[in-house]
Image: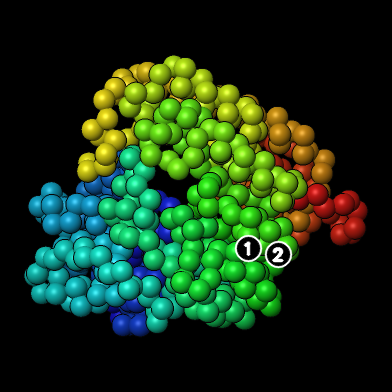
Amino acid sequence: MPRIYIETYGCQMNVADSELMFGVLGREGYVRTDDPTQADVLLVNTCAVRDHAEQRVLSRLGELKQYKRPGDVLGVVGCMAQRLGERLLGRVPQVDLVIGPDGYRGLPELIARARGGERAAAVEFKTWEHYEDVPPAREISVLAFVTVQRGCDYRCTFCIVPMTRGPERSRKLGDVVREVERLAAGGTTEVTLLGQTVNSYADDEHDFADLLRAVGAVPGLRRLRFTSPYPTDFTDRVLTAMAQTPVVCEHVHLPVQSGSSRVLKRMLRRYDRARYLDVVAALRRAVPGIALTTDIIVGFPGETEADFRETVSLVEEVGYDDAYTFKYSAREGTPATRIPGAIPNDVAGERLERLIAVVRGMARRKNVGLVGTAHEVLVEGKAKRGDLLQGRTRTNKVALFQGSDAWIGTYRRVRFTGTTGSTFTAWPLEPAGELAVVG
């Protein structure tokens, strides 16, 4: 049987798409391998949000091509494939296939054609495509990503996603619920709903509040997460549904991008600083103790030192639990490339260093305050280093602790004993009632 290797870069949506591709090819007799040297078909599932991500892929393709034997296929799929299309075939002669996010259903046929010597690109948008009849092949049964929305209709000036994922479209609520029911019946207890602006979900009959309530009522489901929401799509209905649905976790990733209203306007974000802070306050009223993380871009064209200081002050005012911070990366075809006032790389780099220091300092202070408290964690697997297990709280805090491998996939109570600033060391609690769970 042919062996398939997929290497995934980028966001959770790409992880879910890789599971989908394993499902498509599994129906055709392909067997998954984690060793590229043993694969008959090698696919790289790509991200196009930043230039650095694309450069990593190009470098990796140079490494993977050495594993190709006569008759083997090397393909690039996902957002970078969609963005570059046939240009990628010319740029990397060893690549046989280039397939965008709406073309995965055709993988078996395109692979067969590639084995016959035909190089092809399939990058057409298909607004009807939700892959409803393709069960994803997931590696971990207790956790699952469920895509509920594909594409994006927002037009942030810095963002390539509308060009790589196409227009926004949502799955039918009933289809999502049936998928989660199947997962729960198979032992999945935590589900993350995925969408580019997930809380703008709408299937013509239902909104995101309806979806949260419906999925949250699935028997056997213990935790429900979602990412990434858009700040101004947190309607009162959504906030109420979050507050009234017990399985919804107390964590929201709330991208801000900048703390300056002037920069936000140039980014074409649909809020200013004050409106964003109103959303933060509304979330904290609806879900007391909620943890907030965010995305921030520094060095956007025209950003002044005063604009940057406004971003720093917003970070301090909100008090994020963590933040993903980036230097602005120009993306071909996006409106931001035409905005004057490019920021020198060294200036953007220095601002990024200052911002990271503030974010890390605030996160560390918050986490130090949690040392000694007890929490329920879902044991996700082995830690990357050392003979430890890794677990995650409802508020998305990661803890490392000693325990049996038999605990993987189960819920345990632990007490935080220390912190590196970003993760925690912990000690399993026995008996279970030793300390009150706080998050």
Looking at the image, which residue is at 35% across and 19% down?
346
Residue labelled with disc 2: 245
Snapshot colouring: rainbow
Amino acid carrying label 1: it is Leu
**Quadrant in the picture for residue 120:** bottom left
**Label 1 residue SS:** strand
Give the percent coordinates (x, y) of residue 156. 36, 43
- Numbered badge on residue 344: none
Q: Alpha-carbon distance for marks 2 and 1?
A: 9 Å
Residue 294 horizontal/vertical position (percent): 54, 41
Can residue 178 be seen at all in this image of the molecule? yes
Task: Name the residue nearer the viewer: 332 or 113.
Answer: 332
- Is residue 395 visible to the viewer in this orientation of the structure? no
Mark 2–mark 1 contact, CB under 8 Å? yes
The residue depicted at 43 percent of the width and 68 percent of the height is 170
Q: Which residue is mark 1?
A: 224
What residue is at 43 percent from the left and 59 percent from the top? 13
Q: Residues within 10 Å of mark 1 (few under 14, many from 20)?
A: many
Position of 210 relative to 229 (above/below): below
